[in-house]
Amino acid sequence: MQHPTAPRPLCLLTGASSGIGRELAAALAARGIDLILVARRRDRLEELATALRAQHGIAVHVRPADLSDPHNAEALYRAVSAEGLQPELLVNNAGMGLHGPFVDTDLEAELRIVRLNMGSLVVLTKLAVADMRAAGRGRIMNLASLVAFWPFPRFTVYAATKAFVLSFSEALRAELAGSGVSVTALCPGTADTEFTTPAMAATNAYSANPPMDPKVIAARGAEALLQGEGTVVVGLRNQLIAQTPRFTPRDLMVRITGHLSSPR
């Protein structure tokens, strides 16, 4: 007599069309996890979904959405739930940034960064964590950054949003202790992606701390998510860098990061 196989876990992954998000999708698919892929570009999502289905035999659902409007994040989650899809894992990877002196950057662009990096992340986490806690199990991973550990001039708003993500994730993890739901804050350094490479390549930081392969970041992130780890800084060099604020005066730290973010 054949025993029914247990259903595969389902992960809702934002920012899945490129960079770290795309590699996270591949890493999770390789571990037999079904996926709901979210990003703005349907064509890229469909191409990725087709490849992952063929390679790993998993179910992949494509849900295009612009999460720079947090109302779209709420609509997305409620629509997914209405379809009977219940994610046991949530990865808030979608994010954007902008390089340049704050006084010169576009206000609406900065507000989009705030709404995407913080607003939609909070909305999706708020909705998912209620369902996960009721079920007594769940895994959430939020993409923070190495720059979450200190102010970073010329990436002023971006770095501030990542500091929020780190603080939010660590506090929520403590709130959920013993509930069966974990919250991971993944803190990569610069990744070699279409988002980060052009901006960072023009700065001193690019040569001081070369970008990492997003596949390496994604592999560590998938492991951390499934193991329910807490704050995870990817790479030994970055782990050492993340400790510098502990023994460096804050005003000196900001001068250092200001130099790193300056044009080469």
Image (tube, helix red, strand yellow):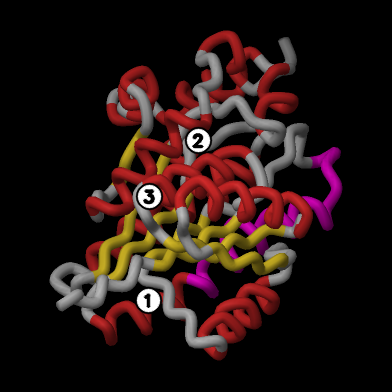
Q: Can residue 210 be found in the magenta stretch?
A: no
Residue at screen point 68% across, 58% down? 39
For label 1, the residue is 129
Residue at screen point 40% across, 45% down? 30
Residue at screen point 61% across, 84% down? 79
Q: Does 121 appear above or below 81? A: above
Q: Does 104 appear above or below 93? A: above
In the rendering, at what x and y percent does residue 43 appear? 78, 54
Give the crowd class for mark 1: few <14, some 14-19, many >=20 residues within 10 Å: many
For label 3, the residue is 185
Sequence-wise first label, 3 or 2: 2
Q: CA distance from mark 1 to mark 2?
A: 26 Å
Residue at screen point 36% across, 24% down? 235
Amino acid type for the residue under numbered disc 1: Val
Q: Main secondary structure of the magenta part?
A: helix
Sequence-wise first label, 1 or 2: 1
Select label 1 or label 2 by which is in front. 1
